[in-house]
Amino acid sequence: MNLLTQMEQSISKMPEQYKNMSHDELNHLITSIKQNLGNDLFLPGHHYQKEEVMNHADARGDSLQLAQLSANTTAKHIVFCGVHFMAETADILSEDHQSVYLPDLRAGCSMADMADIKQTKVAWEELMKLFGDTILPMTYVNSTAAIKSFVGQHGGTTVTSSNAKRVMDWAFTQKERLLFLPDQHLGRNTAYDLGIPLDQMAVWDPILETLIYEGNLTDIKVILWKGHCSVHENFTEHNIQQVREQHQDMAIIVHPECRREVVELSDYNGSTKYIIDTIEGAPSGSKWAIGTEMNLVKRLIKENPDKEIISLNPHMCPCLTMNRIDLAHLAWCLDSINQGLPVNQIKVNEDVSYYSKLALDRMLSL
Ligand code: 13P
Ligand code: SF4
């Protein structure tokens, strides 16, 4: 069954009873099921999840932390409060007797959707013609299991924003050049930080099936897939200029999924974990404009009342797909497990899982 069919079924299937319950009733139901399932249940929550859901999470983390926790939990049921690729990763890293569920199957990721396996194979074939066997593929974990599997099969690895520099450094010990999927901005920002000049980076356009580059092909060190995060692309140079004009003593910190120009103009950049650690460790009274997902920015504002914190873009919204996980879907998913008729299981097929695990294990061992 393809993802679209699964999504449609999920939308139509959530019984009215959960939609009609109050927040108090849903909270009560979730808490009592969690008590009943005890250690059989693990409920990880990504930092971009909304507050009502995070209140029930057993662990909070960024993509790397949640991948590590999923590899180590012994719980029978993993109810993943995050997006589809994260639940797939949890399924790949967990044991056969464990099952992974995503409370709302519509919780995808627009960036992961910008690279599919057919496009990846076409790109690879064309790039092999141009460069021969000189390229190592690597993929941001924000990608489908099929792409992780392709990368694993070709000697490559996955990467998250927390370990991107370390993993890319390793990748250059393996091959002369890299293909980085699917986020051109994380790829560009990371390679730049490692000292690769922008004029040694090309872009692969999967729609036009073309390599975008002006110069001598032999100079290319990194081929960036033309994908991006639709949330982080909303931070602009104009936002930075406005903060600089209106708050002279405010520091600007952004996620490396932001465009190069934005990262360059900011004071600090780093993964979700880096942003959280920096804000939590900052002195009382310090002032921050943050360029990342809005649910996280709101939480940082709430949990750091001694600091002045704003979103770098005053009109920013939460990530819509992360936000699909709500109390009603969480209650429905948990209730279905509790009653022995689970819904929304995420199961990666065995072949794909084998090679994806190779790519993930390579990353986790670095
Ligand atoms: P990290 O959790 O790796 O920082 O990724 C951010 C993100 O966009 C997750 O979808
Ligand atoms: Fe995908 Fe961006 Fe949302 Fe993360 S924040 S899930 S990369 S769309």
Image (cartoon, rainbow, N blue to C red):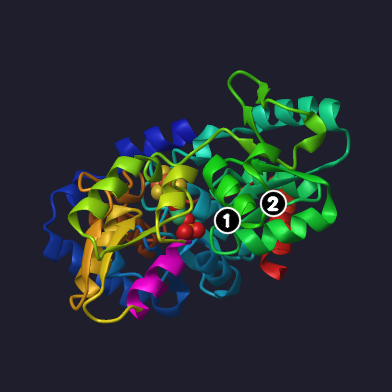
- Distance between mark 1 and mark 2 Cα atoms: 8 Å
**Is residue 256 toward the left or the right of residue 136 in the image?**
left
Residue 59 location, quadrant: bottom left
Would you place residue 167 above or below residue 345 in this image? Answer: below
Name the residue rendered at 70%, 39% in the picture. Answer: 200
The reply to whether the magenta stretch includes residue 279 is yes
Answer with mark 1 or mark 2, whichever residue precedes in sequence.
1
Would you place residue 214 above or below residue 64 in this image? Answer: above
Could you say which disc has been placed on residue 89 in the image? 1
Q: Which residue is mark 2?
A: 356
Location of the C terminus (image quadrant)? bottom right
Would you place residue 111 above or below residue 333 in this image? Answer: above
Identity, as a three-letter code, of the amino acid under mark 1: Thr
Say if mark 1 contacts mark 2, CB within 8 Å: yes
**Is residue 86 toward the left or the right of residue 307 in the image?**
right
Highlighted range, magenta: 270-281
**Res. 129 in view:** yes
Q: How many other residues sit within 10 Å of disc 2, few (<14), some (14-19) or many (≥20)?
A: many
The reply to whether the magenta stretch includes residue 331 is no
